[in-house]
Structures are given as structure tokens and as C-alpha cells.
Image: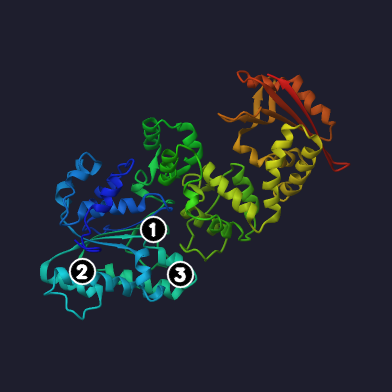
Amino acid sequence: MGIYLNPGNWMFQDTLNGQFYIDKTGIASFVNATMNTPRKFSCVSRPRRFGKSVDADMLVAYYSKGADSRAQFEGLAVSHDPTFEAHLNAHNVIKLNIVQMLPFSDGLAGVGKAIAAEVIPELRATWSDIVPDDETSLPKALTLVYAATGSRFVFVVDEWDCVMREAADDEPAQKAYLDFLRDLFKDRPYVDAVYMTGILPIKKYGRHSALNLFTEYSIVDPKTLDRLFGFNACDVERLCGEFGMDYAEMARWYDGYLLGPERIHVYNPRSVAGAIGERQYSSFWTQTETFEALQRYIDIDFDGVQHDLVAMLDGARVPANVGLFENDMVTFKSKDDVYALLVHLGYLGYDQVERAVFIPNEEIRREFANAVQAGARPQLARLVAESRELARLTLAQDEEYVADAVGRAHDSAAGLRYYNDEQALRAAVKLAYIWSIDDYLRVDELPGGRGFADVAFIPKPGSALPPMIVELKWNKPVEAALGQIRARNYPAVLQGLDGECLLVGITYDEKTCEHSCTIERVSL
């Protein structure tokens, strides 16, 4: 066994020795089905910490000659596949983690040479009479081995796109690396299959992909692998039962990614594992990278980005065309390109049916709020910061502060909607209370009593805060707003909740251009 050639099964065994392993060995069945067919080249891209390396280690353990992996796969999905026995430890494997090659390369343009320099000595150690001492071309060395012995190889390439990320502004280095990969794989008789995994899909140059031999399976279009990306809802519900965690709270924090036309719900495995291991719900995945990475992209000044971010922080979905994305981290021609990259990085979810992007869950929403507040958009940052204070002072019944805060939000929302109508005022209220979604479920037009409350804030499970019912009026006395709440008995919808409820009336007067607020506490 070597480091790169047939590295064995110890990495997968380390995973199995952990707290739990979610069976995704169906990926091996998928590779078996594509092997030695035109579909044998697979590029699987997903956000970081979505289990890419675990899957790569699993494939290495399954295919590597010289290893005895039968016990590891006993009872797992692939063991029930009719092709299981034919491929178990039956292939020469070359495993490459491109990140690990960077220290051996002379600059990012030299990654291909570094790979050859690392792998060829292991080929020579196994086939010493076939690979000459002076051979420096990896495709040539592999071709010699195939010609003499008929040996073919399964290539498992992890972090394939790290050069594209590290050399984001260095197009010559990117092209040199992609040319190396194409030369290594295209029309080579020694290839049984290639499974590449990374964050980004394959870089496009002009109208063509530099590696058009690969079929791509991405978070945007996972195709037949949609049930094998990350943890699905059934996986997480089972784990919550096994480890005594609250599934509803787990879902609130980490659910939200939707895959494929069936909209399969997917969780980030790193986050779920962190919550179970630490017995608390927090931002585990986003701790692996500072929010400056996100901040850079949301500060890009394309028309409409600011308002889209406000809408998404408020729970909205924003239409986006992610199909024109050029699969790199610097080429942005529109806000759609920014959103497409954020989907691939895992900061946005994508609904393939609606063709819309959104903030998928609480973990990511908090990351967005932090990045916005520290970013280069002071108006948006101020709104997020003020929203925290607004929630506190509403509970303290500071009517003057609430009226002023809604007025400032009204000014900001006016760029997205007409100022002088009640819909604009409603948008302003939702914007002003954007931080309230930490503790509240906000419902527009909530049916209650004998009508519909304009905006209702219902405490989420575990929250000790009182519910709030907000009524909006245009060119009317502020007392009329609370009068309507009482007359139509809107709090009736809150039957079953104990304690108090806040009734909030907010009005705008076109003549004076002033906002007014009145707040009253009532018992439920």
C-alpha cells in the first residue's frame, strides 16, 4: 500500500470509529454502474463540510487492491448491490487530495508537476521494470503500466478545485492545472473511473468547459445523487431519536437546503454532528471559516443586491438564474453570478423548481446578519443593528423609539416599493423587526377573530417572549389601529397561549410625514 497508490482503508475506518456514520455507500454503487462507460467521469461538487472527503475515503476503501474491507461494508447499502463482490478491493486506486499537493508545488501553476513527482515513484516501486527512472510524465507512466500489464485505475480526486479557489485571479495557473487533468484522463485506456469532488463545478472558458468529459453533479443540479448529498431529513430524525436531541430545533437551525426537483431536504453533516457532540445548537459549520469570505460577496455592488438580502433575511425567496455562472470566484457579470457562487459555497439554498435562492436556515441567517453588519453597506448594517434594539424597546413599550425606527426602515424600504401606500408601511415594519425572527414566527395577514391582523409575531417554541399583534393604518389616528384590534378580537387566534400579548398600532400621516406608535399589554 502507498500514500497515493492503493492507500487502503484506514481513513474510512477512522470515520467508522467515530460517533456515527450515515450510510452513503450508494455512491459506490453509482460509480460501479458508470465504470468503463462514457459516464465514468464524475465531478461531484458540494459546499464544504458536506461529507465529500468521507465519501472519497469510502470509495478508496471499497476499491483499493491489497486491502480487506469486507467487514467495513457489511450491512451497508452497497453490500446489497449485485455488483458488490465484483468490485470489492478489485481495482488499483490512485487517491489525490489536491490541497495536500500545494506544499510540494512550485507555485500554483506547478501543481500538475507536483502530482506527477509524488505519484510516479509509487508506480515505479510497484512496476520497477516498467516505469523508467527518468520518467516524469504521469500519463506516460500510467500508459506504460497499462500496456505491459493491462492494469487500469480508479482515480479518486478530493478537493479538485482548490487550485481554482487559491488561484482565483490567476487564469494561467488555472488553465495549466485543467490542462494537466485533461491530459491525465481524456482518452486514456488506463482509466476505469474518475470520481472528483470539490466545492465548485468545473471552470468554463468561453462557451466550453475545460473538462467536458465529466458529468457534473452539483448542489444546483445533483441529478441521480440527490439522496446521497449530506444528511437527509430521515437521517437527522433518526439521529435525534438516538441521541435525545430535539428534531424540530435541529431542523430550525440546520434544515433548508433543497436538492433536485423532489426538493429533498438536506442538512450539513458538520453542523448536525457538532450539535449532537456538544449537546447544543450553534453555528458549527460557519466556525470553519470567518464571515469575511461571505462579506466579500455580499458587498459586491450589483443593482438590487441590498434589497434582495433584506428580503432573504426576512425569509423571502429571490428568483435567480444560476445557469450562466462561470464556475469561478471572480467572474461576476450580474447579481445572479454572486447568488450562484453563494449557493455552491453553501451560504444560500436553491430551489430547482422555483429557480429561486434563499437563506436556508438559522445557522446561515446568523452568518449573513453578522456579515451584513460588518460589511460595506452601512445602511443595511445599521438596520440589522437597530433591529436588535427595536425588539427590546418594543417589549419595554417605548412608543417613540418604535415610531422612529419604523420611519427609518420605511425610508429604506422605499427603494424597493412605493413609499406612500400601506404595503410600503408593512414592508417597513417587517424590515424594522428583521431580527425578531430569532424568537418569533412572523405571520402576515393572520386570521383571527373577525378579520386579519396585519402582522403577528408568534413566539417560537422555547421563547419566553410575549406574542405581538401589529395593526397598520394610513392617514388615521394611531388609536384607530388598536381600536380595530380590539373590535375584531384579533388576539382570539392566540387561544392556548398563557400570559400577556402586546398590541402594537403603527400609523403614517402623509401630510406631516410622521409615524406614530402606541403599544398596549393585554392578558390572554
**In this picture, residue 304 sits left or right of residue 293:** right
In the figure, 13 relative to 459: above or below? below
Per the image, label 1 sits on a secondary structure element best described as strand
Q: Amino acid at mark 1?
A: Gly
N-term-proximal mark, 1 vs 2: 2
Residue with the mark numbered 1: 198
Location of residue 197 by image quarter:
bottom left
Q: Which residue is mark 2?
A: 122
- Which residue is painted at 19% across and 56% down in the image? 64
**Label 3, on which residue?**
167
Q: Relative to the observer, which residue lies in front, 245 or 212?
A: 245
3D distance between C-alphas at marks 1 and 3: 15 Å
Q: Which mark is residue 313?
A: none
The picture places residue 295, in percent across and down from the top left corner, at 58, 57
* Residue 60 in picture, x, y percent from top left: 24, 55
Q: Secondary structure at mark 3?
A: loop
Residue furthest out toward the right: 512
